[in-house]
């Protein structure tokens, strides 16, 4: 078995000597609390503010919310190249292994039409962002090759235009290449990425990407304790996002801190319910990922009454969605999984249908 202590010592040394101070950040409106970033573009005014909100949501994998803001930015400024980039980013979910080729290709067609018409404003740096993301939608290559080439392109972008955002997105790209194994990470791959993200976290403790991606990279038994700091900060900084509230539980679960896993996912699911109701979205758009984690945590601590209540609530949600004439999405599958997991627990009493 590989002795990881030299890697850990090397990493800790890197962390202790991190440089930088917190820089001035652009901020978004008071309605959403998603952290803060510094991401100047060729746009100004309201279009730029919508773009910033979109990027903040993007860093928390709040893809539907991010997409709404990028579309608003495009509507306000149709020549704004980075608004197209942002929308393209919302159709690719690398950590989750999801990619909407069709939707992304349509956005690229719209962008290319604007370019051919001479109606796009962009800088050399913004062109590099666009060229990099084109790789992810090149259907002449398989997805593994696209991810590898995209990571290389983002690393080049970071080296040519070093900034918090090129660092964050290049780190995320490096974490999602085919040769990166989350369950059993190679320290030679993990440590350099983590060191970059720690630099970002040091410079801007409110950068959602810095905290979020650190939690993901530390989500393993070897490095989980390193994730306590960003885990404790992230949900307080980006508390409008249900996924941001959920993410600390990845570290808490590794460390078997079940009370904190439960509290994180109660808050996360409740935040998604508030968002779904406030924006009048269908019931399928709630955060059932957090609800699953909450359910499984209740099973872990053998709180079968609360686990059963989740099953009953899912039955009610499924019934309500049908009555509303809504698409059910993942609701039936999640409900079936919950029922099966509950029934597999030998100690669990019968959970009667509501």
Image (cartoon, rainbow, N blue to C red):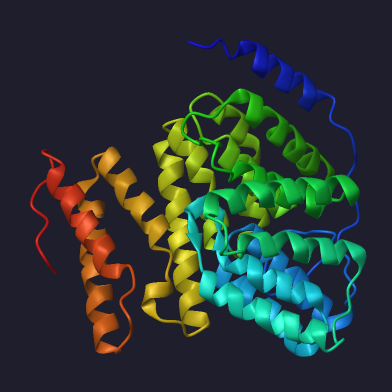
Report the side of 155 relative to 354 (left or right): right
The percent coordinates of residue 325 (x first, y second) are 29, 89
Compare residues 72 and 352 and report the one nearer the observer. 72
Q: How many marks?
A: 0
Q: Is residue 221 above or below residue 180?
A: above
Residue 233, can we see it?
no
Q: Quadrant of the C terminus?
A: bottom left
Report the side of 351 relative to 147 (left or right): left
The percent coordinates of residue 179 (x first, y second) are 55, 36
Residue 66, can we see it?
yes
Seen as rendered, the residue at the extreme front is 140
The percent coordinates of residue 225 (x first, y second) are 57, 28
Compare residues 113 and 170 and report the one nearer the observer. 113
Name the residue: 53% across, 54% down: 143
The percent coordinates of residue 291 (x first, y second) are 37, 58
Name the residue: 68% across, 47% down: 151
Q: Quadrant of residue 320?
A: bottom left
Compare residues 352 and 193 and report the one nearer the observer. 193
Name the residue: 22% across, 79% down: 319
Compare residues 266 and 66 and report the one nearer the observer. 66
Q: Quadrant of residue 245?
A: bottom right
């Amino acid at each position: 078995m590989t002795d990881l202590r030299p890697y850990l010592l090397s990493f800790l040394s890197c962390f202790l000597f991190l440089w930088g101070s917190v820089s001035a950040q652009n901020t978004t409106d008071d309605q959403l609390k998603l952290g803060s970033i510094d991401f100047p573009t060729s746009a100004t005014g309201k279009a730029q503010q919508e773009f910033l909100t979109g990027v903040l949501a993007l860093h928390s994998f709040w893809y539907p919310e991010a997409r709404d803001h990028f579309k608003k930015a495009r509507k306000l400024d149709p020549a704004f190249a980075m608004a197209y980039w942002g929308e393209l980013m919302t159709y690719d979910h690398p950590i989750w292994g999801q990619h909407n080729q069709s939707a992304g290709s349509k956005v690229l067609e719209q962008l290319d039409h604007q370019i051919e018409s001479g109606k796009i404003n962009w800088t050399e740096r913004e062109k590099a962002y666009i060229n990099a993301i084109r790789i992810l939608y090149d259907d002449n290559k398989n997805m593994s090759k696209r991810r590898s080439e995209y990571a290389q392109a983002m690393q080049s972008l970071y080296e040519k235009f070093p900034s918090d955002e090129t660092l964050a997105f290049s780190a995320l790209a490096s974490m999602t290449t085919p040769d990166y194994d989350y369950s059993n990470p190679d320290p030679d791959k993990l440590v350099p990425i983590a060191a970059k993200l720690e630099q970002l976290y040091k410079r801007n403790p409110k950068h959602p990407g810095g905290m979020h991606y650190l939690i993901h990279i530390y989500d393993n038994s070897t490095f989980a304790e390193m994730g306590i700091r960003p885990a404790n900060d992230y949900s307080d900084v980006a508390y409008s996002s249900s996924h941001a509230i959920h993410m600390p539980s990845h570290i808490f679960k590794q460390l078997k801190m079940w009370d904190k896993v439960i509290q994180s996912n109660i808050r996360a699911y409740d935040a998604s319910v508030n968002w779904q109701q406030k924006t009048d979205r269908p019931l399928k758009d709630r955060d059932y990922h957090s609800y699953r984690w909450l359910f499984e945590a209740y099973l872990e601590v053998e709180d079968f009454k609360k686990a059963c209540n989740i099953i009953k609530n899912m039955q009610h949600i499924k019934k309500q969605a049908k009555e509303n004439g809504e698409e059910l999405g993942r609701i039936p599958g999640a409900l079936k999984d919950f029922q099966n997991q509950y029934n597999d627990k030998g100690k669990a009493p019968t959970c009667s249908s509501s």
